[in-house]
Structure formats: structure tokens, C-alpha cells
Image: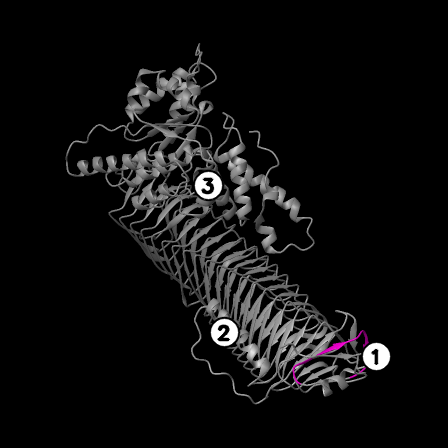
Amino acid sequence: MTNPVYRVAARGRGAHRTISDAVAAVPAGAVVAVAPGVYPENVRLERRVVLVPEQGPGTVEIRPARGPALSVAAPDCAVRQLTLQGTDPAEALVRVEDAAGLVLEECALSHGRIEVLGRPDAPDAPQNGEPPEEGARLAALHGALAADLVEELQDPTTGGVLLLRHTRLHGARHAALHVSGDGRARIEDTVITSVDGIGVVLSGTARVVADGLRITGSSGSALRARGATRLAVRAARLTGPGRHGLLAQDTAQVLLDDCLVEGAAGSGVQAEHEARVDLTGCRIVSPGGSGLVTGGAARLGARDCRVVTPVANGALALGDSALELTDCAVSGSGFSSLHLGERARGELTGCRVTDSEEHALVVTDEARVRAQDTALRDAAMCGVQVAMAGAVALAGCRVTGGESGVRLLSDEESVLLETVVAGQRKAGVELGPGARAQLTGTRIADVGSAGVTVAGGARLRMDGGGVFRAGGTALVLWKDTDCAVSGVRIDTTGKNGILVGDDASGTFEFCDIRATAFPALHVGERAEPRFVRCRIFDCAQDLGTAEGASPVFEDCTAHGVEQSVLPATTATGPGPAAPARPGASGQPSGPSSAAGTSEEEGQDAELADEGAPEAEPESLEDLLTELGELVGLERVKSDVGGMVKLMQTVRRRREAGLPAPPLSRHLVFAGNPGTGKTTVARLYGRLLKALGLLAVGHLVEVDRSALVGEYVGHTGPKTTEAFNRARGGVLFIDEAYSLAPAIAGNDFGTEAIATLVKLMEDQRDEVVVIAAGYPDDMDRFIGSNPGLSSRFSRTLLFEDYSSDELVHIVEHHAERHAYKLTAEAREALSGHFAAIPRTVRFGNGRTARQVFQEMTERQAMRVSELEAPDADALMQLSPLDLPENALTL
């Protein structure tokens, strides 16, 4: 049955003259239609009534002389499409009283606030066990409030209930919406602007759910929850608040999902006292203070969130609070990106912290932080600094760039497990006076000065891992240190491998030191270190000592050392066959990634630098897994896997004292450019090293210009020099067919081939040669010298990538550089690759990289035209970013 409709109009028969007269006279459930006009009155709903404009939105305005324009004292009332304007912005414009219910829909309110009242002394709602996961908690709170709201509007058993939909609130003072006591509110697609105070306030035991809320220009915080309130917000945009985006206090619980807090003058999100805040998929952009702040005994958890360019810290935790960040990104902090002090506790999992003006992570006072699979990059100062009585535990983390990597100044033990520290301008890991650290499987690489420094009174336990390509000394110990180092590898230093200072000591067991510019070991005055079963390779001098030094050596050996104090032997190591500090083309390379086949010229050097350098011992199982993760190349992966099994059998026969079957390890790689030949060659060398069939396993890549001389007598020595650089590893000859041109004449390439054939015979156990080039031309190369066909008995064919595989390579590059392809972009990209002619100029993986680079350039031009692009816009690659035409390569 349709509810009766009653009219309000200034004149006309059968119409009430005022809205107040109508709502006082009509029966419960009636609809009151109001004629256009301005109504200077205070409307009070004491029975269930619906108010609507007779001729649509914007035609009816209620403007009282003073006091609320609308008061609701009955359940299940509704006001739609009306304009309400107050005279005092500090007063209530709409008041929903205790036990009343109101739907306020498509209305415009100005110069006053909305109040939803409840019993101030109402007890907190019982909590029957909260789901542990943030998503479950958010869904539970949203669901419970939304489901109960309809019933509460009709017959509230708690305080006042408000359903606010598609409404605009403007020009309030103190607060635009205040829900107090045990009041309830649901907000949908509502805009709050120009508030001289707070956008939405909750107090007492209030509950509020908001979807699609917009708050712009509040002089105070955009959202504030205090008392024992509960607030759940989805898809909110909080722009330019004068204080915080969200302030949670007392025992309030707040859940934000897919929200943007931009340009807050204070903190983006701040939790105090015993409040609990959970964020999912939120973005905190350019706050004037810190991005995330927690203090007291509060707890703040964030998952898949981004904090961008905060003026202060990205996240700050003090007091006894807890900060938990999972899969979050923090970038461009004006202070340290993450700062934990006092007694705070932090948990970081899968996070990315970049470009801080100070440190990436600071842990001080008595704070504790555990970080796993987290990247800390390019801080202006330290990647990690631990001071006073703080402590960190890093597992599987990467600390790259910055002035120093990890600086430990606390006497509480910090732990670095399977962590990479790389690319610092100064030292990799620094232990200050009295510091304590446990480094297990930790790798320090490409640092400007020392790899690890241990100051007086500090204690270091270092097991496994190593220091690679340090500009200074790899490991420095000073007086009164307590140092035990085991199974550490040191490779290529600008000074010493290990320096034991005056009056210092320490124990070093099963360590390998290679290619140091200064003596591998330096022992200072009165120092008494102990070295057990350590090996030194390819250094000018193995030991330098000061007066009164008393080092102890047990079963230590030197290999390929010019001035040796230790016994020279090749029985237990690679011996003199190991390469002596190869140049750039012979530098050992790290592991490739799953998309490492996308280019032909070592395009994964960036990943290799951040990962374990080649000199780090690698297991055969891990290398085979890495092989299996390469894009495409199924036939090549099968062939290499079969060769590995054959070589395992050869090794086992040798170990059993049986004669080994004939085995040629030299290979021909036939394929077009960009099909991953160089990447697989690197991996092949590392596999042979893991099998014990090569001493080093590094890759030396050459072409015709590196082998062929310019005059008579020049080619043989030049080829021999390149071959010797590859001793212990793999010599990769790119475009090998160019050594045997179709019309040879007096070409010196034939001399290079003859020299190679002899060297491959004389040093057949020390170097593996891989000849690579176009499939059609490699037959000519093999047939150019009878010795080549017997030494290259196996050819691996590298097929061109399919369109889907090229898309996969682009996706990998995008992931590495923090971009995301939309589903439409992936589909369009597949079509783009399918349309490119597969001519001899097609670059395969190199083409995929070039397409990705062009997409990022086009995206940058597109995004630059946006006024304030958010992080998602900066990351997203769409079909608009694809090249307009097929590449001409």
C-alpha cells in the first residue's frame, strides 16, 4: 500500500503552509512533498515521515533563524533532495537524537554540522573474538553495521542512527559530522568541504561505516575517532586536512581500505593511546609531517600501502606501540623513512623503502624491528642505523645505495640473515664500539670503502656469505674485538682482504680470499688472530705483518700468489688456473632472473649486482631451478639439463676411481639476437663450477675484435690473452662465424681459429668455449677448421620468442621498475609483437626491452599532463602507452 502524500505550499487549497505544521499533522509513514521556496523554520520530526521536494533537488531550502534546521526524534525518517542552511556554522544544522533514525539523501547542507546522538554512558559493544586478518576485520565491521542499520533506523535499540547518501556538507565549524555516545552512521558517496575543524568525529562507543567519502579543506583532522569507537572506511579521499588525515585515540579501532590521504599538514595517519588502526591498499601522499605515526600503546598495521614524499618520516613509532607493514612502499621521506624509538616494535615484510633524505631505517632507544624480504634503497645516509639499546633482525633483505649500508651502534645483538648489502659510497656494515652482530649468509658487494668494520669492544659472528668488490678492505677489526668468522668468501678488494689491527684478535675458519690489491691478510702490532683452513688466491702477496704480530695459521694455503708466506699448493682449490682479476669483459657475473633471456648482452647485471655475486658458492639444485625459470627456451633447458646429468655421472665415475667417458663440454649456441644465448652461457659456467668441473665458472665474452689482430703476428697473442682470461670459466665468442668469412682471402680470422683449436686441446680441462651466432652461419664456422668439428660436437638451438613470451619479458621489466601493465595493455602488447616482422633485424628479448622503454617514455608524457597523478597512475602502463607503429629494428 502506497503511503499517503501531503503537500506544503505558501498557498493553495489542501496544503499546509509550513513544513512544521505538516509533519505535526500527518500520520506516521506519510510523505510530505514541499513546494519550491525558502522555509525559515526549525523542522522537528517526531513520527516516521518522509520529506521530499515537490519539483526536484535544489528547489526547497530550509533556513531557520537560529538552531537546527532539522531535528529527528523518531525512527525511520527520511529527508531527500532538500537544501538546509544554518546561520551559525558552530551549531548543529541536523540533529538525530537518541533512539531516532534518519536517511539523509541527495541533500545540500551548509553552515552547520550534523549531530548523531546516543547515550553517553552506553557500554561498549561486546567483542566476541575479532578475526585476526585486517581484511576479515574490515568485512566484519562493514557487514555488521550495514546489515543492522535498516533495522536500527526503524526501531533503534541503541543511539541515533543516520544513513547519509550522496550528500554535500559545506562550511561547518568544529566538525561537519559528529557521531557520539552509542550512535550509528553509514556514509555513502558524500562530500564534506571547507570545515573549520574536523571532517568526521566519533566519540563514546559510536560506530561509523563510510564508502566513497570525500573530505576537502578541513582545518583540523579529516577523520578523528576517540573513546571506544569503531570506524570502517572504504575508498575515501581525504585532501588537504589542516592536521592529520586520520587521528585515532583512546581505544578506538579504525579500518581504512583503498583510501587516499593527500597533503595533510600533520601526519597522514596517527594512532595514539591504545588505538588500533589497520590500512589496506591506502596511499599517503605528501603529508607535512610523517606518513604513519603510532605512539603510546597503539598498534598500526598497513598492507599494500604507499607513503610518498612525506616532509618528515615515512613511518614513526614511539612509546610502546607496534608498527606492522606488509608489502608497503615508502619513498621520498624528508627525514628517515622509518624511525622506531623508545620501546616500539616493528614488523616489516616485503616492503620497499627508497630515496630517504636521511636513513632508510632507524632503530633507537629500546626499539626492536624484524624485517623480512624488504628492500631499503638509496638513503642519503645509512640504509639501517641501530643506536642506543635498539636491535634489528633482517632476513632476506636488500640494503642498497646510500652512504653506509648497516650501522650498528647498540650493545644489543642485531642479526642479518641471507641479506644483501650493496652499492654504498662508504662501508657496507659498520659495528661501533660495543656493538654486537650476527651475520649469516650475508653478502656485501660493490661498496666504496670497507666491507665490514668492527670497532673496539664490538662482537661479530659471521658465518657464510662474503664481501665482493670492496673499494677498501673487506673485513677490518680493531683492538679488543670479539670476532669469529667462518666460511666467508672475499673476492676483489681495493686494499686488504682482512685487516687485523694492533692488539686485535679473532678466529677465521674456512675462508677464501681472492684478488686483493694489498696483501690478502694484514696483521697489526701485537695482534694474535688465528686462521684455520683458509685459502688465498691470485694476490700479489698473501700476508703482511707489523712488528710484534703473532698470527697463527693451521692448514692454510696460497694459490697463484706472487709473494707467498703460506704454503703454495693446488691440491685443495682451483690453483693457478683461476683467472687473475679479469677485466670488465671477464668479470664474474651473478645469477640471472626469470626473464634473463630477454636480452643478449648481460641485461640482468642490475639484478646480479643486488643478488649473490658469482663467487658465492651456489648449489646445483638452485642453479637448475634458475634455469627452469627462464622465459621460453624449452628445448635449450632440456638439452642443458641432460648435459648436467651426463656430467654428474662423469664426476661420480672419477670419484669412484673409474675412467671417465669421452665428454666435450664445448658448445655451439645457434640463434637470432636477443634469444638469451649470453644468459644461458653464464648459467652454464656456474653449473659447471657447481659440478666441480670448472674452478671459477665466470664468463668472458669476446667477439672478432677481441681475437683478431690488425697486423701479422698480432692475432695469436691477442687470442691467447682472451683465452687466458677465461681460465677456470667460459669463453663466449659472439658472432663466431665472423672469424670465418665467406670469402676468407688473407683474413686473420683463420689464424685466430687455429690458435683457439690448439688452446682448447692444451687446456681442455680449464676452459669451456661457447661459439654463438646466427644458425645459418654457424655451419660455416664449424667447417672452417677440421679441429672445430671434433671439439664442438653439440649445438643448442635458441628459437625466437613467441608473442606471449615477449609480453612476459616486458612484464618482468615492468615489475623490476615498479610499473604495472593493465590487462588491456597485455592484450594489446601481444598483438603488437605478433605484428612485428620476424626478419633478421628482429631483436627478440632486446625488442621487448626497447618496447618497454618506449612505453615508459610515452607514459611519462601522458602522466605529465595530469594535475596530481597518484601512485597508481604513475605505475600503470595502458594501451595508450604502446608504440604507435611496429618497431624498426
The image position of residue 821, as x and y in percent, is 54, 47
Confirm whether residue 581 shows in the render: no
Query: Residue at point 16% right, 31% down?
Result: 659
The residues bearing labels 3 and 1 have C-alpha atoms spaced at a distance of: 83 Å
The label nearer to you, 1 versus 2, is 1
Q: Which residue is mark 1?
A: 12
The residues bearing labels 1 and 2 have C-alpha atoms spaced at a distance of: 66 Å
The residues bearing labels 2 and 3 have C-alpha atoms spaced at a distance of: 41 Å
Which amino acid, mark 1? Gly
Tell me which numbered mark, 1 or 2, is placed earlier along the sequence: 1
Which amino acid, mark 3? Asp
State yes or no: residue 593 in magenta. no
Residue 316 sits above or below residue 740 on the image = below
Residue 740 sits above or below residue 819 on the image = above
C-beta proximity under 8 Å, tags 3 and 1: no
The image position of residue 867, as x and y in percent, is 70, 54
Q: Which stretch did the figure color magenta?
A: 28-41
Q: Which residue is mark 3?
A: 604
- 730 or 681, which lies in front? 681
C-beta proximity under 8 Å, tags 1 and 2: no
